[in-house]
Image (cartoon, rainbow, N blue to C red):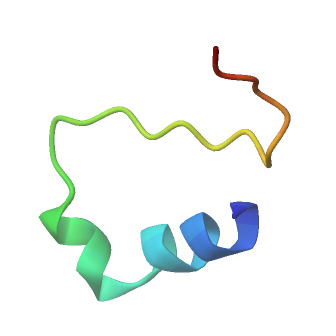
């Protein structure tokens, strides 16, 4: 999950990501 987000943010596609919050926790967070 973390590596995929890093590659995405370093790619030209990251210019399309605006005004968002990206939660990269590596599977540590728990959702109830």
Q: Quadrant of the N terminus?
A: bottom right
| Residue extending furthest toward the bottom | 12
Give coordinates of residue 24: x percent, y percent.
63, 44
Q: Is residue 4 shown above or below 30?
A: below
The number of numbered discs placed on residues in the rendered structure image is 0
In x, y percent, where is residue 28?
85, 34
Outermost residue toward the top? Answer: 32
Q: Is residue 10 left or right of residue 20?
A: right
Percent position of residue 18, x then y = 16, 47
Q: Is residue 21 above or below residue 3?
A: above
Q: Is residue 5 above or below residue 22?
A: below
Q: Quadrant of residue 2?
A: bottom right
Quadrant, the C terminus? top right
| Residue name at image x 46 percent, y 75 percent | 8
Residue pictured at 65% horizontal, 21% vertical: 31
Q: In the rendered view, does 16 fall on the left or right side of 14?
A: left
**Residue reaching furthest to the front:** 32
| Image side of residue 22 versus residue 3, left or right | left
Name the residue rendered at 73%, 72% in the picture.
3
Which residue corresponds to the image point at 21% horizontal and 57% vertical from the top-left?
17
């Amino acid at each position: 999950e973390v590596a995929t987000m890093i590659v995405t943010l370093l790619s030209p596609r990251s210019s399309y990501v605006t005004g968002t919050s990206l939660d990269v926790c590596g599977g540590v967070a728990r959702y109830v």
